[in-house]
């Protein structure tokens, strides 16, 4: 992954770390969802290159929420393998509900990410390393 795709994955991983309802949504699941979401070409241009990072991030949240709503997140290379088969449906529903909320409310995403930025800068100024966060 590179460029916009890597940025989106990083933002989503940050969001997962600070949002309690998303606890347990692994980095591997996120990377897989990013690969699926941007595995398309429109008019000979990769889809993520047609939008700003903000717009592409909204699409990514919606795409991941839709896959969770379906209850299936296939492995990117081994499509018959469902990564969600080992996750209890109640947890998948919790992830789906929070991602749907975030996908439909960009102001909420901004609020959550600003809170994380504030927490990090406060900890750094207090001398606490990121590894201790």
Image: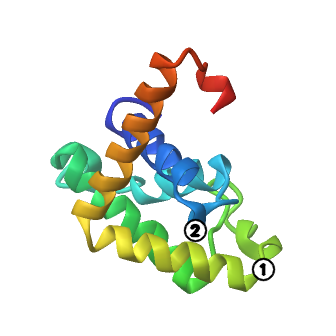
Q: From this viewpoint, which residue is outermost toward the right?
A: 86
Q: Earlier in the sequence, mark 1 or mark 2?
A: 2
In the image, taking residue 13 as reference, residue 90 lies left or right, namely right
Image quarter where the C terminus lies is top right
Residue 45 seen by the camera: no
Quarter of the image where one finds residue 23: bottom right
Q: Position of residue 76 (x, y in %)?
A: 62, 56
> Residue 18 versus residue 88: which sits nearer the camera?
18
Q: Position of residue 58 (x, y in %)?
A: 29, 61
- Residue nearest the observer in this picture, 91 or 2: 91
Q: Residue at x 40, y 76 (%)?
A: 100
The colour scheme applied to this rendered structure is: rainbow
In the rendered image, is residue 35 in sight?
yes
Q: Tag 2's secondary structure?
A: helix
Residue 87 appears left or right of 77: right
Residue pictured at 67% horizontal, 53% vertical? 26
Of residues 33 and 112, which is closer to you in this image? 112
Residue at (36%, 56%) from the top-left corner?
A: 40
| Residue at point 71%, 59% (across, down) | 78
The dot on residue 88 is: 1
Q: Give the SS element for disc 1.
A: loop
Q: Position of residue 31 (x, y in %)?
A: 56, 48
Q: Is residue 130 above or below residue 32?
A: above
> Can you tell which mark lies on residue 21?
2
Foreground disc of the pair 1, 2 = 2
Q: Badge 1, how many Cα within 10 Å: few under 14, some, many 20+?
A: few
């Amino acid at each position: 992954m590179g460029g916009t795709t890597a940025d989106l994955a990083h933002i989503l991983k940050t969001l997962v770390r600070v949002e309690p309802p998303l606890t347990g949504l692994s980095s591997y699941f996120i990377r897989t969802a990013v690969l699926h979401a941007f595995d398309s070409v429109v008019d000979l241009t990769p889809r993520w290159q047609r939008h700003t990072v903000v717009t592409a991030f909204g699409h990514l949240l919606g795409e991941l929420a839709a896959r969770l709503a379906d209850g299936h997140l296939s492995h990117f290379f081994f499509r018959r393998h469902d990564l969600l088969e080992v996750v209890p449906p109640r947890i998948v529903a919790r992830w789906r509900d929070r991602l749907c909320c975030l996908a439909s409310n960009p102001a909420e995403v901004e609020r959550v990410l600003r809170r994380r930025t504030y927490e990090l800068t406060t900890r750094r100024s207090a001398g606490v390393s990121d590894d201790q966060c």
